[in-house]
Image (tube, rainbow, N blue to C red):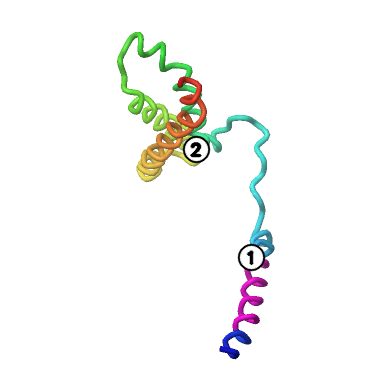
């Protein structure tokens, strides 16, 4: 038992020092992302966060007027806006190929879930 205590303390100290050095090593990896100077860029809209944010704003703006004309399910409308946003943003940033379009369609699903979650966090509480 005494040997275990003697081994445990240096092991924990080594583990602590390694974990404390990880953030410093991560900073030395490379350049950090630049803070965007414009609110919406094609590069930002091509990301899941950008597409979700843009979709949330567009759906909030157009959902009520569209419901007066057509009864489109909100989830379908959100996915359509996400997909169109990501396809356009991908076309303007890296070019649209079949592989990029398939990846944008998959990312649009994630952006759709994110946009609907953003709605639940921000606006749904106001409606209750």
Measure the C-alpha gap from mark 1 to mark 2.
30 Å
**Quarter of the image with the N terminus in it:** bottom right
Q: Position of residue 4 (x, y in %)?
A: 57, 86
Residue 43 within the magenta-colored segment of the rendering: no
Question: Crowding near pointer 2: few (<14 within 10 Å), some, many (20+)?
Answer: many
Check contact, mark 1 vs mark 2: CB within 8 A.
Answer: no
Q: Is residue 15 magenta?
A: yes
Q: Quadrant of residue 66?
A: top left
Residue range in magenta is: 8-22
Marked residue nearer the N-terminal end (1 or 2)? 1
Furthest-top residue in this view: 68
Toward which corner of the image does residue 63 lie, by quadrant? top left
Across and down, in percent, residue 70 comes to: 31, 13
Q: Name, please, the residue furthest toward the front.
A: 1
- Determine the secondary structure under disc 1: helix
Which residue does the image show at 65% across and 81% down from the upper left?
A: 10
The image shows residue 21, relative to residue 111, as above or below, that is: below
The residue depicted at 65 percent of the width and 37 percent of the height is: 36
Q: Secondary structure at mark 2?
A: loop
Query: Which percent across, then down, holds residue 15?
Result: 61, 74
Residue that numbered label 2 is attached to: 46
The label shown at residue 22 is 1
Give the label on residue 3, or none: none
């Amino acid at each position: 038992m005494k040997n275990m205590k003697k081994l445990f303390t240096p092991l924990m100290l080594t583990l602590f020092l390694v974990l404390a050095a990880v953030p410093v090593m991560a900073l030395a990896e490379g350049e950090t992302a630049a803070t965007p100077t414009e609110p919406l860029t094609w590069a930002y809209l091509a990301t899941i966060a950008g597409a979700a944010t843009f979709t949330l704003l567009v759906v909030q703006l157009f959902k009520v007027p569209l419901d007066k004309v057509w009864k489109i399910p909100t989830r379908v409308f959100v996915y359509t806006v996400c997909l169109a946003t990501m396809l356009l943003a991908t076309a303007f940033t890296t070019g649209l190929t079949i592989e990029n379009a398939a990846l944008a369609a998959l990312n649009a699903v994630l952006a759709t879930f994110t946009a609907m979650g953003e709605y639940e966090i921000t606006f749904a509480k106001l409606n209750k």
